[in-house]
Image (cartoon, rainbow, N blue to C red):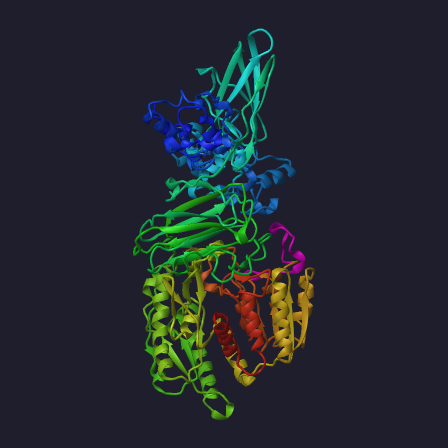
Amino acid sequence: MDLAGTPLGAVPLGAVGGCDLLTGFAFTCVSLGADGDTSLYELANLLEDAGSSLAASPLGAVPLGAIPLGAVPLGAIPLGAVPLGAVDLAGTPLGAVPLGAVGGCDLLIAPFTCASLGANEDTNLYELAVLLEAEGSSLAASPLGAVTLDQLPLGAIDPLALLGLDATLADIFAGTTLEDVTDWGSITLGQIIIAMLIVADYPWEELEFDELGVQDFAATGAVVTYSAQLGVTGGPGLVEVMATLPEGYRYRTGTSTLNESSILDPVVDQVGNVQTLRFFVTVAGGNALSFDVAPGLRLATSTIDVVAGGVTALDAAPHTVVEVEAASFDVLSPNVLYFGYITTRDDIDTYGIVPPGEGFRTSVFLGHLSEDVDLVMYRPTTAPYSVSGTPLGAVPFEDEGFEAVSQPLSPEALADIPITDPDSLAAVSANRSTTTESTSVLEDGTRSGNYTIQVSGYNGVASDDAYVLRAKIRSEVPPPSCIGRDSIATGLSDFSALTAPGLESVFVINGARLDALHGPGSSTAVLDSLATLVAYLNVPANGFGSGAIIRVDGFDYSAWDTNPCDPDAANQIAEAIRGPIVVYAGANPSLKYVTIIGSDEVIPFFRQPDDTAYANESSYAGEFEDNALYGSLFTRHILTDDGYGDLDPIPWLDHALFLPELGVGRLVEEPVDIIGQVSTFVAFEGTLDSSTGFVSGYDFLSDGAAEVASNLTAGGASTTRLINESWTSQNLIDGLLVSDGVPDVASPNAHYDHHRSLPAAEQATPPGGLTNAVLFDVGDIETFAAANPGDLARALIFTMGCHAGTSVADISVLSTSSTNPTDWAQVYGQEAATYVANTGYGYGDTVTVALSERLMAEFALRLDGSLSAGQALVGAKQHYFG
C-alpha cells in the first residue's frame, strides 16, 4: 500500500510524541535524519531504509484514535469546489423569487391584476401568496394555478438538472396545472421557479451554505476518519451507539466499520445543522467503531460526542479543521463555488482566471461574508480593457431611485486594501460590512496570461468562517432590434459659419429631422428664433461674444433609423457632428458654448459605456420599450452631451472619457418649447438672478445638500433649507413653487426617476404604496405653471437625483407604453428654466460629500455671479476630475 496517499503522509512526528517515541529503540531522529516535522510516511521510508519498519517501531503501538487530528492538514480546505448543478435547492424560499421571473403580471388573469392586488413585477411569490390569501384565494387556486407547467419557460430545459430529472416538465406535466398536481414527491414549487432562472445568474454566493449540506456535492474537500473505542461493561449483545457531530459536519455514506469490517450506515437524525448518527452494532470485548465525516465550513477545534447503551465509549481526541492553500484552485472555473478563508490580518488569497476570448465578460462575485472582505482584480497586461465595479479612489453609495430601501455602506478610501500590483490594477470592489462584492472585465482579445483575483480582509480583519467565490463568463449584450423609424430624407449641412473667427457660441440644428418628427415648418420657426438670438449676441454692446448656427441636416442617420436601439450607430452620428466643432475650437480659443437643438431623436446624445456593476443603467431599461433610449440603457450606456464640448477626450479603459472644455447645453423638446427658451434669453438679456436660493435633501444626500446650501449662501443667495428626514411633497411645493417668488437658484435633492421624486417622509413606504398624492412629480410643475405663467422663467434648478436629467423624447415612446413621456428636463424647459441633472444614476457617499454630491457642491460654489451657468458646470467637472 502506498502510504503517501494516506493520512500518515500528513501527520508530522511532533503530533504523536515526536522523536521521544524512538527512545530505547535502535534508532534516533538524528541517526535517521529526521526531526519533529518529518511525517509518519517519511519516517516509514527512513526506517525501511534502515532495515526496520514503522509497525515495529514504538510508533506502531500508538492507536490511531489517540492521534491528535489537529495536526492533520485536512485536504485543501474543508470544502473545495461545488458544481452548481449538484446543489439541492429544495426549500429555497419563494420570498427570493420576484414575480417578474415567472412571467410577471401578464400571468394574472381576471379577476386579479397586479394593480388590484397591489403587486408589481418586483413582488415575490411569497408576497403574492399573502395578497391572494387576503383576497380569499391561494397561489395554487389563483390564475397562476391555471398556467400549465409545460407552458412555462422551464418546460424547455432538458434535462432538468437542478431537479435531478431526466425529462422536461413538458414531458411530465403536459396539460397539468399547479392546481391539478396532488403528489409532487420531492419536487417543490420553489425548485421549479428557481430552475427557471439562468443558472449562472442566480446569486449562489449568497445562499446559506451552512444549512444546505453542500459538502455532499463537493468535488474536493477534507474528510475526517473518526474512531471510537467501545468497551463492554455487561455481556456481549446488540447496543445502540449515538454519535453527535459538531455543527455543520456531514456523515459520509458507506464509510462505517466495526473492527475494520463494514457495517450498515447509521440512522441519521438532523436537527437544524446538527447530525446525530445512530448505530446498531453487536459488541463483545474491545471494539473499534470508525466512520468518515466531512467537516463543517468553519475553521475550529471540535469533538464528536459518543454515547452507547450498555457499553463504555471512549471518543478520540479533539480535532481541528485548518485551511491549506490548494494549487488546484489557482485557476477558477466558471459556475463553480470556491470556499476560502481569511484567517489572519495579513492573509491575502489569490486566484487566476483564464481570459475567455474577445467579446466575453468575466464577472467575479464574493459572498457568504461574516466580516468585511474586499475583492481586487488585476489585469494580465497593459492592453486596453473595460472593467465594471466600484470606481477607484472612492467607493460609491449609489442612489438607486426612490424605490431603493437598503444600500451598502462605502469606505472612505482604499487605504486599508492591500494593492500588490498598482500598475496592473483593473478594479476594486470594496463595499462596507458584509455586502457581496463583485467586479468584471470585458475581454478584447489582446491579452496574454491570466487575470488575478485577490481576496483580503478590510483593515486587517480575519475570520474562521468561509467566504464563497464564483466566476461567471458571458458574451457581451448585443443591441436589441427595435422597430425602425420611418425613412427621413436628409437635407443640406451648412458649416460655413465656422469659417468666421472669434465665435463664442454655436447652435447645432438638424432642420430636416425637426420637420419630419415635429411637423412641416417646425425648423423654420426654430431657425427664425435662433437667428434673432444670434443677432442679439452679435451686438457688442450686449456684452456677449458672437454666435452662429450650424446645420447638420445632411448627416446620414439611415443605420440608426433602421435600428434605433443600436448605440454604435448613434455614436457614429454624434462623432461626425462633433468633428467640425472640435476643429474650429482648436483654432479659435474664443469658442465657449455649444447648444444642441432638439431631443435625442433629432441630434443624438453620445452613448458612453456604463462599467458599473451596481446601479448599472441596464437596470433602468425596464422603464421604456422599443426606442432609442431603451437600446442605450439595455446595452449598459449612459447618455451624455459632454462629447460635443470635449476637445481632447481622455483614453480610458476601452473607450474615451469625456471631460468638456466647452459649456454644452441642449434645448428640448417641442419646437414651441425651444422657441420659448430662446425668447426668454433675449428678453432677460441672457442673465439669471441669484438673490434667493432653496435646497432640499435627506438620507445620504443630506451632507451634500448642506454644502450646496452653504455655497449658495456664500455666493450671495439668501438660501432656505429643507434638509431633514420628514418633509413631504407639500413641504417641497411650499418651498420651491412659490407664486411670484420662485427661488432664483434651487436644488431639490431627493431620490428621483425621470418624472417623479420621493419626499423624505415617504422613504419607508413600499413601492406599491406610493401614489401621485405623496410623490412630487412633473404634474406638480405643470399645475403650478398653468396657474402662475412665467414664474419659473430664468430659475436655475439642479439636483443630485437619479435619472432626474433623463430626456425622454415623446415621439420615441409607444402610445401603448405605460412610460410617462413627460420628463423633468422637458417640463422645466417648457417654463424656460435652466436645468442641470444626472442623465443616469446619481452617486453619493455616507461618510463624506463625494461623487454626484461633490459635483453639485462644486457647481453651487461657482454660482456667485462671476461665471455663466455653463462655465460653472464646466469648472465643476474639471475641478472634480482634478
Q: Is residue 624 visible?
A: no
Residue 534, position in %: x, y? 45, 85
Residue 460, position in %: x, y? 53, 51
Residue drawn at (64%, 36%) of the image = 136
Compared to 120, does 838 lie above or below? Answer: below
Compared to 640, does 212 lie above or below? Answer: above
Compared to 6, does 77 lie above or below? Answer: below
Where does the N terminus fall, quadrant-wise?
A: top left
Q: In the image, 493: left or right of 775?
A: left
* Residue 565: quarter of image: bottom left
* Residue 732: quarter of image: bottom right
Q: Residue furthest top?
A: 235
Q: Magenta includes 753?
A: yes
Q: In the image, 725: left or right of 289?
A: right
Please name whichever residue, 132 or 66, is drawn nearer the observer in this view of the structure: 66
Compared to 716, does 659 lie above or below? Answer: above
Please name whichever residue, 801 or 299, is drawn nearer the observer in this view of the structure: 299
Please name whichever residue, 555 or 11, is drawn nearer the observer in this view of the structure: 11
Residue 734, position in %: x, y? 69, 68
Number of marks present in the image shown:
0
Residue drawn at (40%, 30%) of the image = 9
Q: Is residue 810 visible?
A: yes
* Residue 479: quarter of image: bottom left
Residue 335, position in %: x, y? 41, 41
Q: Magenta includes 273?
A: no
* Segment tinted magenta in the rendering: 752-772
